[in-house]
Image: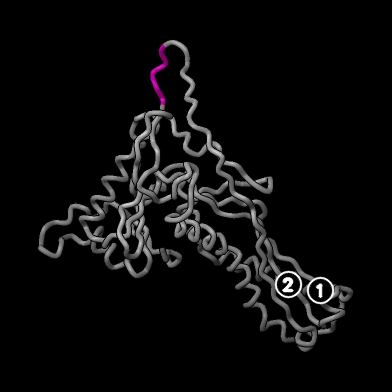
Protein backbone atom coordinates (compact mmCIF):
# COMPACT_ATOMS: atom_id res chain seq x y z
CA UNK A 1 0.00 0.00 0.00
CA UNK A 2 1.29 3.44 -0.87
CA UNK A 3 1.66 5.34 2.39
CA UNK A 4 -0.24 8.59 2.10
CA UNK A 5 -2.94 10.29 4.16
CA UNK A 6 -5.73 9.17 1.83
CA UNK A 7 -4.83 5.49 2.09
CA UNK A 8 -4.22 5.78 5.81
CA UNK A 9 -7.68 7.31 6.27
CA UNK A 10 -9.20 4.30 4.50
CA UNK A 11 -7.12 1.97 6.69
CA UNK A 12 -8.27 3.77 9.84
CA UNK A 13 -11.89 3.46 8.74
CA UNK A 14 -11.40 -0.28 8.24
CA UNK A 15 -9.77 -0.69 11.65
CA UNK A 16 -12.45 1.45 13.31
CA UNK A 17 -15.11 -0.83 11.82
CA UNK A 18 -13.18 -3.86 13.08
CA UNK A 19 -13.10 -2.34 16.58
CA UNK A 20 -16.85 -1.72 16.46
CA UNK A 21 -17.38 -5.29 15.27
CA UNK A 22 -15.42 -6.61 18.22
CA UNK A 23 -17.50 -4.49 20.58
CA UNK A 24 -20.72 -5.89 19.13
CA UNK A 25 -19.43 -9.46 19.25
CA UNK A 26 -18.80 -9.45 23.01
CA UNK A 27 -21.24 -10.83 25.57
CA UNK A 28 -20.30 -9.22 28.90
CA UNK A 29 -22.01 -10.33 32.12
CA UNK A 30 -21.61 -7.28 34.32
CA UNK A 31 -25.06 -5.81 33.61
CA UNK A 32 -26.69 -8.86 35.21
CA UNK A 33 -25.26 -7.99 38.61
CA UNK A 34 -24.28 -4.31 38.48
CA UNK A 35 -26.16 -1.02 38.25
CA UNK A 36 -24.89 1.31 35.53
CA UNK A 37 -24.37 4.81 36.94
CA UNK A 38 -23.23 7.59 34.56
CA UNK A 39 -20.61 9.85 36.12
CA UNK A 40 -19.71 13.45 35.34
CA UNK A 41 -17.00 14.10 37.93
CA UNK A 42 -13.70 12.61 39.06
CA UNK A 43 -15.42 11.01 42.05
CA UNK A 44 -19.04 10.07 42.52
CA UNK A 45 -20.58 10.00 46.00
CA UNK A 46 -23.40 7.60 46.86
CA UNK A 47 -25.03 9.11 49.93
CA UNK A 48 -28.32 7.44 48.96
CA UNK A 49 -26.98 3.93 49.52
CA UNK A 50 -28.83 2.34 52.40
CA UNK A 51 -31.86 4.61 52.09
CA UNK A 52 -34.35 1.80 51.54
CA UNK A 53 -37.84 3.08 52.36
CA UNK A 54 -41.41 1.78 52.32
CA UNK A 55 -44.80 3.32 51.69
CA UNK A 56 -47.20 3.92 54.59
CA UNK A 57 -50.83 4.98 54.84
CA UNK A 58 -51.01 8.77 54.69
CA UNK A 59 -52.58 9.77 57.98
CA UNK A 60 -51.95 13.34 59.12
CA UNK A 61 -48.79 14.94 57.76
CA UNK A 62 -46.13 13.18 55.74
CA UNK A 63 -43.45 11.40 57.76
CA UNK A 64 -39.99 12.21 56.46
CA UNK A 65 -37.75 9.15 56.54
CA UNK A 66 -34.43 10.74 57.39
CA UNK A 67 -32.27 7.66 57.37
CA UNK A 68 -28.52 7.55 57.98
CA UNK A 69 -26.45 9.43 55.39
CA UNK A 70 -23.36 7.66 54.08
CA UNK A 71 -20.16 8.99 52.55
CA UNK A 72 -19.37 6.12 50.20
CA UNK A 73 -17.64 7.29 47.00
CA UNK A 74 -16.16 5.72 43.87
CA UNK A 75 -13.21 7.37 42.12
CA UNK A 76 -13.00 7.10 38.36
CA UNK A 77 -9.92 5.57 36.76
CA UNK A 78 -8.66 5.71 33.18
CA UNK A 79 -7.87 2.49 31.31
CA UNK A 80 -6.15 1.96 27.96
CA UNK A 81 -5.19 -0.80 25.53
CA UNK A 82 -2.80 0.05 22.68
CA UNK A 83 -1.24 -1.83 19.76
CA UNK A 84 1.51 -0.83 17.33
CA UNK A 85 2.20 -1.96 13.76
CA UNK A 86 5.40 -1.26 11.88
CA UNK A 87 5.07 1.14 8.96
CA UNK A 88 6.90 -1.30 6.73
CA UNK A 89 4.28 -3.98 7.35
CA UNK A 90 1.48 -1.63 6.33
CA UNK A 91 3.50 -0.58 3.31
CA UNK A 92 3.93 -4.25 2.37
CA UNK A 93 0.15 -4.84 2.52
CA UNK A 94 0.28 -6.90 5.74
CA UNK A 95 -2.47 -4.84 7.41
CA UNK A 96 -5.05 -7.59 6.88
CA UNK A 97 -3.17 -9.71 9.38
CA UNK A 98 -3.91 -7.12 12.07
CA UNK A 99 -7.65 -6.79 11.56
CA UNK A 100 -8.40 -9.63 14.04
CA UNK A 101 -6.12 -7.91 16.56
CA UNK A 102 -8.20 -4.74 16.30
CA UNK A 103 -11.41 -6.77 16.57
CA UNK A 104 -10.02 -8.34 19.73
CA UNK A 105 -9.24 -4.86 21.02
CA UNK A 106 -12.91 -3.99 20.61
CA UNK A 107 -14.03 -7.16 22.33
CA UNK A 108 -11.61 -6.51 25.18
CA UNK A 109 -13.08 -3.02 25.60
CA UNK A 110 -16.59 -4.45 25.88
CA UNK A 111 -15.45 -7.09 28.37
CA UNK A 112 -13.31 -4.83 30.56
CA UNK A 113 -16.24 -3.77 32.80
CA UNK A 114 -16.65 -7.47 33.66
CA UNK A 115 -13.12 -7.48 35.01
CA UNK A 116 -13.83 -4.44 37.18
CA UNK A 117 -17.25 -5.55 38.43
CA UNK A 118 -16.36 -9.12 39.33
CA UNK A 119 -13.04 -8.12 40.87
CA UNK A 120 -15.13 -5.97 43.21
CA UNK A 121 -17.49 -8.85 43.98
CA UNK A 122 -14.54 -11.17 44.72
CA UNK A 123 -13.07 -8.51 47.01
CA UNK A 124 -16.33 -8.12 48.90
CA UNK A 125 -15.05 -10.28 51.77
CA UNK A 126 -12.29 -7.78 52.60
CA UNK A 127 -13.59 -4.47 51.20
CA UNK A 128 -15.86 -2.11 53.20
CA UNK A 129 -19.14 -0.97 51.68
CA UNK A 130 -21.32 2.07 52.48
CA UNK A 131 -21.97 1.09 56.13
CA UNK A 132 -18.27 0.66 56.95
CA UNK A 133 -18.49 -3.14 57.21
CA UNK A 134 -17.09 -5.56 54.66
CA UNK A 135 -19.62 -6.05 51.86
CA UNK A 136 -19.94 -9.73 52.87
CA UNK A 137 -19.94 -9.66 56.65
CA UNK A 138 -21.67 -11.05 59.72
CA UNK A 139 -22.45 -7.77 61.48
CA UNK A 140 -24.07 -5.20 59.22
CA UNK A 141 -25.91 -2.67 61.42
CA UNK A 142 -29.63 -2.57 60.61
CA UNK A 143 -32.26 -0.41 62.29
CA UNK A 144 -32.78 3.14 63.43
CA UNK A 145 -29.77 4.79 65.11
CA UNK A 146 -29.58 3.68 68.72
CA UNK A 147 -31.70 0.61 68.06
CA UNK A 148 -29.59 -1.38 65.63
CA UNK A 149 -29.02 -5.13 65.36
CA UNK A 150 -26.33 -7.06 63.47
CA UNK A 151 -27.34 -8.83 60.27
CA UNK A 152 -25.18 -11.27 58.30
CA UNK A 153 -24.99 -11.78 54.55
CA UNK A 154 -22.12 -14.28 54.83
CA UNK A 155 -22.73 -17.92 55.70
CA UNK A 156 -19.11 -18.60 56.57
CA UNK A 157 -16.92 -21.49 55.46
CA UNK A 158 -13.52 -21.73 53.83
CA UNK A 159 -14.17 -23.27 50.41
CA UNK A 160 -14.88 -21.72 47.02
CA UNK A 161 -17.36 -18.87 47.28
CA UNK A 162 -20.86 -18.95 45.80
CA UNK A 163 -23.45 -16.21 45.85
CA UNK A 164 -27.20 -15.75 45.97
CA UNK A 165 -28.15 -12.59 44.08
CA UNK A 166 -31.30 -10.52 43.87
CA UNK A 167 -31.03 -8.75 40.52
CA UNK A 168 -34.77 -8.15 40.13
CA UNK A 169 -34.63 -4.60 41.50
CA UNK A 170 -33.57 -1.34 39.90
CA UNK A 171 -30.49 -1.23 42.14
CA UNK A 172 -28.13 -4.21 41.99
CA UNK A 173 -25.40 -5.46 44.35
CA UNK A 174 -22.48 -3.90 42.44
CA UNK A 175 -22.12 -0.47 40.83
CA UNK A 176 -20.47 0.07 37.44
CA UNK A 177 -19.67 3.75 37.20
CA UNK A 178 -19.01 5.03 33.66
CA UNK A 179 -17.31 8.37 33.21
CA UNK A 180 -16.30 7.98 29.55
CA UNK A 181 -17.09 5.15 27.18
CA UNK A 182 -14.31 3.18 25.47
CA UNK A 183 -13.26 4.92 22.25
CA UNK A 184 -10.93 3.91 19.42
CA UNK A 185 -8.20 6.27 18.27
CA UNK A 186 -5.39 6.20 15.73
CA UNK A 187 -1.98 7.85 15.53
CA UNK A 188 -1.07 7.39 11.88
CA UNK A 189 -0.18 10.88 10.74
CA UNK A 190 3.21 10.87 9.05
CA UNK A 191 4.19 13.74 11.34
CA UNK A 192 3.32 11.87 14.57
CA UNK A 193 6.32 11.13 16.78
CA UNK A 194 5.64 7.40 16.75
CA UNK A 195 5.91 7.36 12.93
CA UNK A 196 8.84 9.74 12.69
CA UNK A 197 10.91 8.30 15.57
CA UNK A 198 9.94 4.62 15.66
CA UNK A 199 8.58 3.97 12.16
CA UNK A 200 5.33 2.53 13.50
CA UNK A 201 1.64 3.30 13.54
CA UNK A 202 -0.40 3.19 16.74
CA UNK A 203 -4.02 2.25 17.39
CA UNK A 204 -5.56 2.19 20.82
CA UNK A 205 -8.69 2.42 22.92
CA UNK A 206 -9.29 4.06 26.26
CA UNK A 207 -12.15 4.61 28.64
CA UNK A 208 -12.79 5.97 32.10
CA UNK A 209 -14.84 4.57 34.95
CA UNK A 210 -14.70 2.15 37.88
CA UNK A 211 -16.69 -0.35 39.89
CA UNK A 212 -17.85 -0.16 43.49
CA UNK A 213 -20.04 -1.89 46.03
CA UNK A 214 -23.79 -1.29 46.06
CA UNK A 215 -26.36 -2.71 48.46
CA UNK A 216 -25.08 -5.66 50.48
CA UNK A 217 -28.67 -6.74 51.12
CA UNK A 218 -28.99 -7.86 47.49
CA UNK A 219 -26.23 -10.48 47.68
CA UNK A 220 -25.56 -13.34 50.08
CA UNK A 221 -22.23 -15.18 50.05
CA UNK A 222 -21.17 -18.57 51.27
CA UNK A 223 -17.94 -20.55 51.36
CA UNK A 224 -19.66 -23.62 52.77
CA UNK A 225 -19.95 -26.78 50.70
CA UNK A 226 -22.67 -26.11 48.14
CA UNK A 227 -25.43 -28.64 48.79
CA UNK A 228 -29.19 -28.57 49.30
CA UNK A 229 -28.93 -27.83 53.02
CA UNK A 230 -26.47 -24.92 52.77
CA UNK A 231 -28.38 -23.52 49.81
CA UNK A 232 -31.71 -23.71 51.66
CA UNK A 233 -30.25 -22.06 54.77
CA UNK A 234 -28.60 -19.28 52.77
CA UNK A 235 -31.76 -18.66 50.78
CA UNK A 236 -33.90 -18.46 53.92
CA UNK A 237 -31.46 -16.04 55.56
CA UNK A 238 -31.18 -13.88 52.45
CA UNK A 239 -34.90 -13.57 51.91
CA UNK A 240 -35.51 -12.70 55.57
CA UNK A 241 -33.67 -9.36 55.43
CA UNK A 242 -35.51 -6.33 56.76
CA UNK A 243 -34.84 -2.63 56.33
CA UNK A 244 -34.00 0.02 58.91
CA UNK A 245 -37.73 0.60 59.30
CA UNK A 246 -38.27 -3.01 60.39
CA UNK A 247 -40.22 -4.03 57.29
CA UNK A 248 -39.26 -6.89 54.95
CA UNK A 249 -37.10 -5.93 51.99
CA UNK A 250 -38.82 -8.61 49.89
CA UNK A 251 -35.54 -10.06 48.71
CA UNK A 252 -35.70 -12.59 45.87
CA UNK A 253 -32.70 -14.91 45.67
CA UNK A 254 -33.27 -15.12 41.93
CA UNK A 255 -29.84 -16.33 40.84
CA UNK A 256 -27.12 -18.63 42.18
CA UNK A 257 -23.73 -17.39 40.95
CA UNK A 258 -20.87 -19.89 41.00
CA UNK A 259 -17.35 -20.28 39.60
CA UNK A 260 -16.86 -23.03 36.98
CA UNK A 261 -15.59 -25.44 39.65
CA UNK A 262 -19.00 -25.39 41.36
CA UNK A 263 -21.17 -25.68 38.25
CA UNK A 264 -22.01 -29.36 38.77
CA UNK A 265 -22.80 -28.89 42.45
CA UNK A 266 -25.02 -25.91 41.65
CA UNK A 267 -26.95 -27.80 38.99
CA UNK A 268 -27.44 -30.74 41.32
CA UNK A 269 -28.87 -28.41 43.96
CA UNK A 270 -31.35 -26.49 41.81
CA UNK A 271 -32.02 -28.67 38.76
CA UNK A 272 -31.96 -32.31 39.89
CA UNK A 273 -35.42 -33.80 40.41
CA UNK A 274 -34.24 -36.03 43.24
CA UNK A 275 -31.52 -36.00 45.86
CA UNK A 276 -28.86 -38.68 46.23
CA UNK A 277 -31.06 -40.50 48.79
CA UNK A 278 -33.98 -40.60 46.35
CA UNK A 279 -36.05 -37.90 48.08
CA UNK A 280 -37.65 -35.16 46.01
CA UNK A 281 -35.53 -32.03 45.60
CA UNK A 282 -37.77 -29.29 47.00
CA UNK A 283 -35.16 -26.66 46.06
CA UNK A 284 -35.47 -27.46 42.36
CA UNK A 285 -35.72 -24.43 40.05
CA UNK A 286 -35.89 -21.91 42.91
CA UNK A 287 -32.85 -20.02 41.58
CA UNK A 288 -31.21 -19.73 38.19
CA UNK A 289 -27.63 -21.00 38.00
CA UNK A 290 -25.15 -18.52 36.51
CA UNK A 291 -21.60 -19.79 35.94
CA UNK A 292 -19.10 -16.92 35.89
CA UNK A 293 -15.41 -17.50 35.07
CA UNK A 294 -14.47 -14.27 36.87
CA UNK A 295 -15.49 -15.67 40.27
CA UNK A 296 -12.37 -16.73 42.14
CA UNK A 297 -12.91 -15.78 45.79
State the extent of the magenta-drawn residues as a range. Answer: 55-59
Q: Which mark is residue 197?
A: none
Considering only vertical position in the picture, is 245 above or below 214?
Answer: above
Q: Which mark is residue 188?
A: 1
Q: Main secondary structure of the magenta part?
A: loop
- Residue at the spot of label 2: 203
Residue 113 % position (x, y):
56, 59
Considering only vertical position in the picture, is 193 above or below 143?
Answer: below
Q: Residue at the location (47% across, 25% down)?
A: 65
Packing grade of label 1 (10 A; few <14, some 14-19, many >=20) is: many
Q: Residue at the location (44% across, 34% down)?
A: 52
Quadrant of res 3: bottom right
Pointer 1 with pointer 2, Cβ within 8 A: yes
Residue 156 % position (x, y):
31, 55
Residue 285 appears left or right of 177: left
Residue 57 in the magenta stretch? The answer is: yes
Amino acid sequence: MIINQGNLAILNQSFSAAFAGGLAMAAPMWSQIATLVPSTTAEQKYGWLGKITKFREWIGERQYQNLVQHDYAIKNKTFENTVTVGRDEIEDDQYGVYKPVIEQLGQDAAMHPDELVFAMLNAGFTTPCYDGQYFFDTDHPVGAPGNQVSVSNFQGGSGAAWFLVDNTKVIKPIIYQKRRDYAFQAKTSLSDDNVFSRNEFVWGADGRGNAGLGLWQLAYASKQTLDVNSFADARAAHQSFIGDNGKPLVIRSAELWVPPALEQAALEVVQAERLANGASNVMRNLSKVVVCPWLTA
